Structure formats: structure tokens, C-alpha cells
Image (tube, helix red, strand yellow):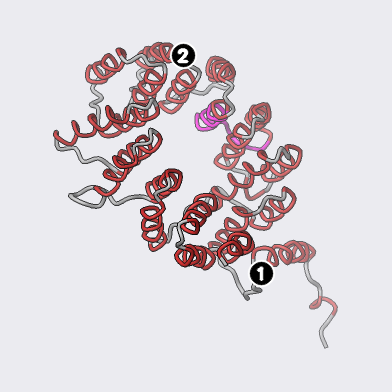
């Protein structure tokens, strides 16, 4: 017979057990005997992607005990917060983030910085500032990384006036020396707010403080100048880069390609790409994606397809999922369901599935063109990939019979 002492279970264990059981039922619907940390993270991410109910989102996130140490958890945390913000469940969002911030296992600068940024992305910059100011109460020392997180939060919330205030006042108030990321974030803010010319004064301040600008600094400035159609300034920035010993590379080119494509100048962007190729510089997947997106947006699907089919050949990078998704979407929009169908099959062979709206458009287009059997095949492949979303396809399948 066991003694009373041997039967005693520590209260802390009981509390842990009682909180773990509901978590297991949420993240472990198949009642597996054991879930690894990675399995738990993957299950949480899959659930959060399809969940829309605010209370359920918080329940899943709590069950997963999300941590910034895990890449999957960081994605899950961002998805959870963005969905709560999109549903305007700000009280729920605030309560959830405050809980996370005060978790004993999350008392580190990296996690609090993530909270600061998430508040900013949710349009709650005042909470970002409050979190930054209370870091000492959480037992954490503020560093330049915390300052940069706060500036990023202000940029994300599009409060450029507050970016200026934080940049001007906080380094002195909290004895923090700005670094390269600090200055780059401020340059981005000035460019996003349509004041790209002001960024030159930031470059001067960097020079004064012996902080050397990099390609991100100059590329961000060029993107802002392109957006404001100050084309004459681009050559000046390129000359300044060379003068300061920062040789333009593919990173700089990608900033320029993206900017030109945004302006509907994809032909000019392609000429720029051909120019770097002639100098022996191999474009990366981002260069190709920007051109594909640019030509698609301008309605030049033939050129977009031509660029896409160059990928994977002659040392060119293979298409990314985004290259596939973008081209398939615009092919469906233009009514070229045959090419979209072929690309969708190749895409899914690689384990990539376009979003519901794009696949539904493809399926409906195939059905209208008397290709119902192929349409059903697409639906079946998607259902196999996402068994939890079978109900979404019921209405579409009924139309195919």
C-alpha cells in the first residue's frame, strides 16, 4: 500500500497537466501519444492559417506556447495577430500579447521586440511605445535592437511623424547609439512618406557618425525616388555609391527592377536586366519575379510567360512558388486556362498550391470550356493536400457534376 507521502503530486505539476490537456486536444486531434515541438508548431500553423474566429485563434496560439526561437512559431504568431487585427478584435489582441509578454519563458529582448513590432503592424503604436518604455520593469535592458524594433513598428503603422520623434528623442533619452539598421529604417520612413529628398540628410548624418551606408540604404532611397518619379536623381545616387565605396550589385538592381515594374515600366526594367547579364551578372529569382509580376500587371502575358520559361535554363534560377502563383493568377484573369492548368499541375507537383481564389478561378474556367474532368482533377489534388478544407470545395464540386 502506498503511503500518503508517495501519493502526493506537486500542485505545479497538476497545473501544468490541466493546461496541457486542452492543448493536446487542439493541436493533436488524432490523439497521438506524443508530439514533438516541431509537430506542435506545424499543427498550430496549419490551424491558424484556416481559422477566422478570434477566440479560437487565441486558443490555438495559447496551446502552442509560441516562441520566437522557432521560425514556424514566429510565422504563427504573426498570422494570429494579423487575423485578430483584421477582425478588429483589438481588446482580444491586446490581452493576448500582454499575456505573451509576461510569460516567464518569454522574458527576453527578442520576444519583446517581436511584440513591439506586432503592435505596430496592428495599428496600435501607442502599445509599442509603452512596451518599449516598460522593458526595464520586465527585467530587460533596452538595446539598439529594441530601438530598431520600435522604429519598424512606427513604419509599419505608417506613422512617419512618430518615426521622426522616436529617432530624434529616444537615442538620447535611453542612451542608445543608432546603428546601420536604425538609419535604414528612418530612410525607409522618409521614402514611404514621399519625402525621399530628406533621406540625403540622413546619409550626411551617417557619414558624420562614421556609419557606412550599404546597398539597402541606397536601394531604399532609389525606390523612393522612383516612386516620386525623380528619375534624374537615380544616376546621382549611383555616383554617390561609387564615391563612398559601395559598388552597386544585384541587390541594387533588384531595387530598381521592382521600382520600374511598379511604375508600369517593365520594358525598361527588362532592358536593365539584360544590361547586367551582358556584364556577366546572373539575375536571381527576385529579379525574374519582379519582371513576371510587372508584365502580368501591364497585361503583357506573352512576355511574362517568356521570362517564366527562361527560368531553370542557362544557369537561371528555377521559378519560386510566387512566380508560379502570380503567373497562374493572371493567366486565369486573361482567360488562358490551358496554360494556367499546365502550370498549376507543375506547381502542385512541387508541393505548392495556389490560394483558394486562384484555384477556384481556374476550376471554373476549365468547366466553362468543357474541361470538367480536368477541373475535378485539380480539386482532388487540392483536397488531398488540404484535407481540413474539403468543405470549401463542396459548392464548386456540385457545379462540376
Say few, some or many: other residues with alpha carbon within 10 Å of mark 1 (under 14 / 14 to 19 / 20 or more).
few
Looking at marks 1 and 2 on the same chain, the residue that comes earlier in the sequence is marked by 1
Near-viewer residue (196 or 165): 196
Identify the disc placed on residue 29: 1
Near-viewer residue (222 or 354): 354
Say few, some or many: other residues with alpha carbon within 10 Å of mark 2 (under 14 / 14 to 19 / 20 or more).
some
User: Who's the residue at 62% across and 41% down the image?
Assistant: 82
Residue 121 point in image, percent of width and height: 59, 34
Residue 263 inside the magenta-drawn segment: no
Give the CA separation, mark 1 to mark 2: 52 Å
Q: Quadrant of the C terminus?
A: bottom right
Near-viewer residue (195 or 364): 364
Outermost residue toward the right? 4
Residue 141 inside the magenta-drawn segment: yes
Identify the disc placed on residue 261: none
Q: Quadrant of residue 216?
A: top left
Residue 335 point in image, percent of width and height: 43, 47
Identify the disc placed on residue 195: 2
Residue 199 point in image, percent of width and height: 41, 15
Residue 338 point in image, percent of width and height: 38, 55
Label 1 close to label 2 by CB (< 8 Å)? no
| Side of 256 relative to 139 (left or right) | left
| Side of 7 relative to 255 (left or right) | right
- Which SS class for mark 2? loop
- Which SS class for mark 1? loop
Q: Quadrant of residue 225?
A: top left
Q: Quadrant of the N terminus?
A: bottom right
User: Who's the residue at 54% across and 21% down the image?
Assistant: 175
Q: Please, is residue 238 above or below residue 271 in the view?
A: above
Q: Which residues are magenta?
A: 138-153
Figure disc tally: 2
> Which secondary structure type mostly characterizes the magenta part of the structure?
helix
Amino acid at each position: 500500500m502506498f503511503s500518503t507521502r508517495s501519493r502526493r503530486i506537486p500542485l505545479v505539476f497538476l497545473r501544468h497537466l490541466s493546461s496541457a490537456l486542452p492543448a493536446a486536444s487542439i493541436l493533436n486531434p488524432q490523439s497521438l501519444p506524443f508530439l514533438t515541438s516541431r509537430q506542435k508548431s506545424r499543427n498550430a500553423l496549419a490551424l491558424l492559417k484556416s481559422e477566422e474566429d478570434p477566440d479560437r485563434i487565441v486558443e490555438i496560439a495559447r496551446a502552442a506556447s509560441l516562441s520566437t526561437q522557432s521560425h514556424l512559431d514566429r510565422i504563427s504568431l504573426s498570422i494570429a495577430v494579423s487575423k485578430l487585427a483584421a477582425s478588429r478584435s483589438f481588446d482580444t489582441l491586446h490581452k493576448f500579447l500582454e499575456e505573451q509578454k509576461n510569460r516567464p519563458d518569454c522574458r527576453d529582448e527578442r520576444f519583446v521586440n517581436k511584440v513591439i513590432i506586432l503592435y505596430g503592424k496592428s495599428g496600435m503604436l501607442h502599445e509599442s511605445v509603452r512596451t518599449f518604455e516598460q522593458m526595464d520593469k520586465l527585467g530587460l535592458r533596452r538595446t539598439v535592437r529594441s530601438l530598431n524594433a520600435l522604429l519598424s513598428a512606427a513604419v509599419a503603422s505608417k506613422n512617419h511623424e512618430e518615426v521622426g520623434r522616436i529617432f530624434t528623442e529616444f537615442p538620447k533619452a535611453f542612451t542608445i547609439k543608432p546603428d546601420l539598421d536604425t538609419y535604414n529604417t528612418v530612410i525607409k520612413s522618409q521614402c514611404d512618406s514621399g519625402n525621399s529628398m530628406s533621406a540625403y540628410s540622413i546619409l550626411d548624418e551617417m557619414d558624420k557618425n562614421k556609419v557606412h551606408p550599404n546597398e539597402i540604404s541606397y536601394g531604399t532611397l532609389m525606390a523612393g525616388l522612383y516612386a516620386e518619379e525623380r528619375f534624374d536623381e537615380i544616376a546621382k545616387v549611383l555616383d554617390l555609391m561609387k564615391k563612398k565605396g559601395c559598388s552597386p550589385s544585384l541587390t541594387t538592381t533588384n531595387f530598381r527592377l521592382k521600382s520600374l515594374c511598379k511604375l508600369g515600366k517593365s520594358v525598361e526594367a527588362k532592358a536593365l536586366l539584360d544590361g547586367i547579364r551582358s556584364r556577366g551578372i546572373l539575375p536571381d529569382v527576385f529579379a525574374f519575379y519582379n519582371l513576371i509580376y510587372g508584365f502580368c500587371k501591364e497585361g503583357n502575358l506573352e512576355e511574362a510567360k517568356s521570362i517564366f520559361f527562361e527560368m531553370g535554363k542557362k544557369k537561371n534560377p528555377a521559378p519560386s512558388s510566387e512566380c508560379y502563383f502570380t503567373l497562374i493568377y493572371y493567366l486565369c484573369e486573361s482567360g488562358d486556362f490551358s496554360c494556367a492548368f499546365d502550370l498549376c499541375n507543375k506547381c502542385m507537383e512541387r508541393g505548392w498550391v495556389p490560394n483558394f481564389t486562384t484555384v477556384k478561378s481556374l476550376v471554373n474556367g476549365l468547366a466553362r470550356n468543357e474541361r470538367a474532368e480536368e477541373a475535378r482533377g485539380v480539386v482532388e489534388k487540392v483536397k488531398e493536400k488540404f484535407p481540413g478544407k474539403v468543405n470549401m470545395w463542396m459548392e464548386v464540386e456540385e457545379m462540376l457534376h
